[in-house]
Amino acid sequence: MIAYLLRRIAYALPILLGVNLITFALFFVVNTPDDMARMHLGMKRVSVDAISQWKAEHGYDKPLLYNDSAAGFSQLTDTIFYAKSARMFALDFGASDDGRDIWNEIKVRAGPSLAIAVPVFVIGLLVNITFALLMVFFRATYLDVWGVVLCVALMSISGLFYIILGQFLIAKLWHWVPISGFSSGIDALRFLLLPVLVSIGAGIGSGARWYRTIFLEEIGKDYVRTARAKGLSERRVLFRHVLQNGMIPILTGAVVVLPLLFMGSLITESFFGIPGLGSYTIDAIQSQDFAIVRAMVFIGSALYIVGLLLTDISYTLVDPRVRLQ
Amino acid sequence: MMFRPVVLWTDALIFVLLAVILLFAVYVRRHAHLRAPWRGVLRSPAGLASAMVLAVFVVIGLLDSLHYRPALPVQSGQSAHYGVEVLSVLDRLLTDLRTHTEKTYSAPLATHLYARETRLQPDGHSARVYPRLEYGGAQLADPQSDWIADIERRIAIGSAKGLVLAGVLLLIALAGRAFKTRTGLAQAARDIKTGALPWRTVIVMLTLLAVSGCVLAELAAGYHVFGTDKVGQDVLYGTLKSIRTGLVIGTLTTLVMLPFALLLGITAGYFRGWVDDAIQYIYTTLNSIPGVLLIAAAVLIMQIYIEAHPDVFDTAAARTDFRLLFLCLILGVTSWTGLCRLLRGETLKLRELDYIQAATAFGVSDWRIITRHILPNLQHLVLISVVMDFSGLVLAEAVLSYVGVGVDPAMHSWGNMINSARLEMAREPVVWWQLTAAFVFMFALVLAANLFADSVRDAFDPRGKRIDVYE
C-alpha cells in the first residue's frame, strides 16, 4: 500500500511539472512581462523606464528560463521560471499584484468555501440518490417517465437561472434570507442557506438522472433476480441490494471531486458575495491579476491529482476484488 | 454592387462544418447499416420533435452567418464605398427590429417607456409622465382603449397565418411523398398513417412552430414583443442574434477538438507502448488543470494580444469574431481529453479482436487498418459524444460570459444578455424581460439538444439497449 502510494506520488510530480510548464508558457512566453506591464500601466504611451520599473517591482525583470549573466547554479535559479513557477512546489505563491501574500489569503478564504461546498456535496448526494431510487422504485410507470422528463428539463436550465430566481424569490420578494454577504460564527447560517439550497437544486437534474441509470444497471444483474427469487420484497431488494451495490460507482465517482471542494464554486460564491476561494479567483480574473490565477491553477491541478489518488484507494476499500498494483 | 460579402472566420468554418455534415449525410444514405440508427432517431417522437426545433435554430443561425457590408450612397465619379458595419442576411430580414430603437427600457408589448420623463403638456406647464414609445404601439390612436383589442387581433391573425402555413407545408410534404411513390394523395396519407413515422408529432410540432413564429412576427411588426433593453434595442432582436453565438460555440468547439481526440486517442490505443504513455501524460496534465481557469487564463492573454495589435482587424465584427473563434479553440483544447480517453480505451479493445488480428496477419498497413477497420467502429462513440457535448457548451457560454472570459461584450449572446440584465433585478419595478427572453431561448435550444442527444444515444449505443430497463 505505502509503496503504491509513493509510486503514485512520484507519477504525480511530472504531471504537476507539466501543468507548471503550461501555465508558465501561457503567462510568460505567449504574453511577455512587457505586455503585462503595459497593460497594468495603461496601454498607450508608456515609457520604457516605467515598464522596467514595474517589472522590477513585481520581480519580472529576470530572464525567462536561463540566466547568462549569473554564475554557477543561479544561472537556473535567478530566472522568472524558478522565482515564479517552480517555487509553487514549495507552496510559495508570492504576492498578488496588489501586494498581499497569496498563501495567507488562501488559508483565510478556504473556510467560507468549504462552508458552502461541503453541505452542497453531502446533502446534494443524498437528495440525488433519494430521487434516483424513487424513480427506480416506480420504474416503468408514468411517475418514472415524467421524472426523467423533469430531470432533462431541469438540467437544460442554465445554472445562472437557479441563482437569479432563488435570489429574486426567496431573498428579494419574501425576505427570508439576505440576498448576499457573509458573516462569521452561527450567524453565517443565514447567509449560507440560500446558496446551498440553490446549488443543490441546480444539481438535481443531472445527478438524479445519472444515478438512476446506475441503479437500473444494477437491477438487471443476476443477484437481484436471485434476491427476488428468494422472495424478498421489492423494497428490501432495492435498499439492501441495489442501493449498496449502486453506491460503489456513485461514491468512487464522487471521491475525485472531494479535494476540489476546497476551491469553492466560482459562480455561486461571486453571486452571493461569499469571501471564498471561488470569488477570489473570479476577482483575480476580472482584475487581471495573473499571480493569483497562476496560483489557483496550480492548486486546482494538485487537488485534482490528489482526487485521482483517493479514487484509486477508495476502489480497494469498497471492492475487495480490486488490488492496488 | 449593392453590398460586399464579408466572410468572417467563424462563417467560413460554419460552412465547412455544414459541408462536412451534408457529405456525411450522403454517405449515411448510401449505407444501410448507418441509415438504420438514424431512422431510429427520427422515428422516436422526442428525437423528431427536438430535431425540428433544432432545425429552426440552425436556419436562423445560418442566415445570421451570411455577412456583408452594405454599400454607401455613391457620389458621382467615385468608386463604391462600403460601410464599416457588418450586417448579416438575418439583419436584413429583421431591419425593422434592428432599427426601431427606443430611448431606454420598455416592458414587453408596452406602448409607454419604462422611465418617466419631463414633458411639456398641451396646457402649458410641464409634468413627469411616461412618454409614448416611438415605435412600440405607435399605430394606436388611444393606447388605453385600443391596446387589448389590437393585441388580440394580431394574435388571431398570427395564429390563422400559422395554421395556414403549417397546413401548406404539410400538404407539400404529402404531395412530395405521393409524387415519389406515384400514388394519390389519399393513399400517401394512409401510408404515412400506418407507417412508422410519428406523424402526430410532426403535425403538432409543425403547427406549434408555425403558429408561434407567425404570432411573434405579427406582434413584432407593431410592438417590442420582449420589450427593449437599456439602450432601447429590441430584446427579441438580441435573442435571435444570440442564437448564432450559441450554435457556433456548441459546434465549432467540437470541430476543433475532434481531430485532436481522434488522432491522439487512436494512436495511443493502437500503438501502445511509449506513444500511449506520452499521450496519456498529455491528457492527464491538461485534464488536471481546472477548465474554467485554463479558459480564463487563455482568454485574458488573448485580450492582451488583441489590444496590442489593433491593426490586424479591419472591422469591429472581425475583432469580436476572432474572440469567439478563440473561445471555441480554447474550449476545444479543454474538452478533447474526455473523448480522447474514451477512444483510446475502445481502440485498445478493438485491436485485439480477431478481424484486426487477421488484417495484421495479412500484412495490411497500420494506416489502412486504422482507417478501414478501427475508425468506422469508433464512429458511434464520436457521434454520441459530439451531440452530448453540444448542450453543455451552450450553457458554458453563459457562465463564461458572466465570469468575464466569454465572448466579446459587444457580441450578442445569451450570456451577455443575462450578465447585463442581472443587476437590473434590483430596480423597482423589476426589469425581468431581458433575463426571461435569454433564459427561454437558451432553455429551448438546450432542451432540444438534450432530447436529441438522448435519442441519438439510444439509437447508436448498443450498450443502452442491452440493459433490461423495464423487466
Image (spheres, rainbow, N blue to C red):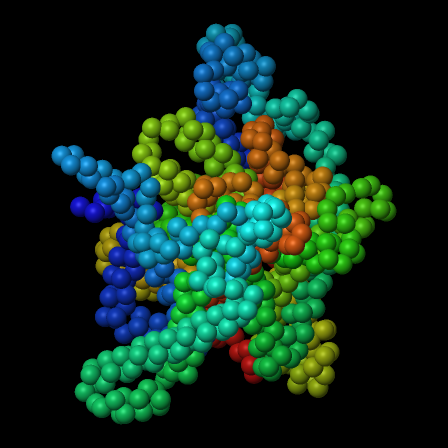
Residue B400's place in the image compared with A70, above or below, is: below
Residue A257's place in the image compared with B41, above or below, is: above
Q: Is residue B333 left or right of residue A93?
A: left
State the residue in front, A155 or B280: A155
Query: Where residue A233 appears, x then y in whole percent?
Result: 72, 83
Tell me which residue sits at (23%, 70%) in the image.
Answer: B30
- Residue B168 sits in quarter: bottom left
Q: Which residue of the protein is positioned furthest toward the right in this rendering?
A: A186
Residue A299's place in the image compared with B160, above or below, is: above
Tell me which residue sits at (28%, 65%) in the image.
Answer: B25
Query: Where residue A217 appears, x then y in whole percent?
Result: 57, 71
Q: Which residue of the protein is positioned furthest toward the front in this rendering?
A: B123
Tell me which residue sits at (41%, 75%) in the image.
Answer: B157
Q: Which residue of the protein is positioned furthest toward the left in this rendering?
A: B77
Tell me which residue sits at (29%, 48%) in the image.
Answer: B67
State the residue in front, B339 or B188: B188
Query: Where residue B170 appears, x then y in whole percent?
Result: 32, 80
Q: Is residue B277 visible?
A: no
Mark count? 0
Q: Is residue B228 visible?
A: yes
State the residue in front, A172 or A82: A172
Residue B431's place in the image compared with A263, above or below, is: below
Query: Where residue B348 appears, x then y in whole percent?
Result: 41, 56
Q: Is residue B420 left or right of residue B350?
A: right
Q: Is residue B5 left or right of residue B397?
A: left
State the residue in front, B428 or A262: B428
